[in-house]
Amino acid sequence: QAEMEVPANLQRLFVSGTELRKGMQLKSAVAHDSDAAEQLEAGYLDLTLQRRTPDQAAWSERFEAAGPLAHEVLKKAPALIKTDSELVEEAVGQCGRALEHAGQALLNNREV
């Protein structure tokens, strides 16, 4: 964080396409990917660091803070947020009812 001068809340870390979230253990993140699991056992792992926009980070924090009321936060969010698949996934992760307020394009997306 300090070397890159990118605040932690703007950083997203992925392993094998799975975002590492607070409290997630590496073993569970690589469980679906045998190559990554082997790398982890060998003591190395390929990671991807992605930078968020400050706006995305702010909405992510709102959903996390709202917890089971994240659906109310998404309901009041602008259309741009309701169609951001990553943010909608985060809201749904906090509260399944948030999916009711996702943008139409995301409602048919099984990954959300």
Image (tube, helix red, strand yellow):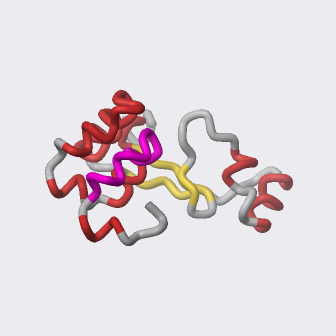
Q: Position of residue 48 (x, y in %)?
A: 53, 58
Q: What residue lies at 26% left-to-right and 37% top-to-bottom?
A: 72
Q: Main secondary structure of the magenta part?
A: helix
Question: Which range of residues does the magenta coloring cover?
Answer: 91-102
Please tell me whether residue 98 belongs to the stretch shown in magenta.
yes
Nearer to me, 95 or 85:
95
109 to 11, vertically: above or below: below
The mark total stands at 0
Instruction: Choose between 82 and 43: the one closer to the eye.
Output: 82
50 sits left or right of 13 in the view: left
Task: Name the residue at the top extreme.
Answer: 65
Q: Position of residue 30 (x, y in %)?
A: 71, 56
- Residue at coordinates 42% horizontally, 36% vertically from top-left? 8
Q: Residue at x 17, y 42 (%)?
A: 76
Left or right: 86 as drawn, with respect to 17 = left
The quarter of the displayed image where residue 59 is located: top left
Would you place residue 25 above or below residue 102 in this image?
A: above
Locate residue 54, reporting x and y percent: 25, 43
Which quarter of the figure is the C terminus placed in? bottom left
3, 24: nearer the viewer: 24
Q: Is residue 99 magenta?
A: yes
At 85% from the left and 55% from the top, the residue drawn is: 42
Quarter of the image for the N terminus: give it.
Answer: top left
As drawn, is 42 to the left or to the right of 61? right
The image quarter in which residue 47 lies: bottom right
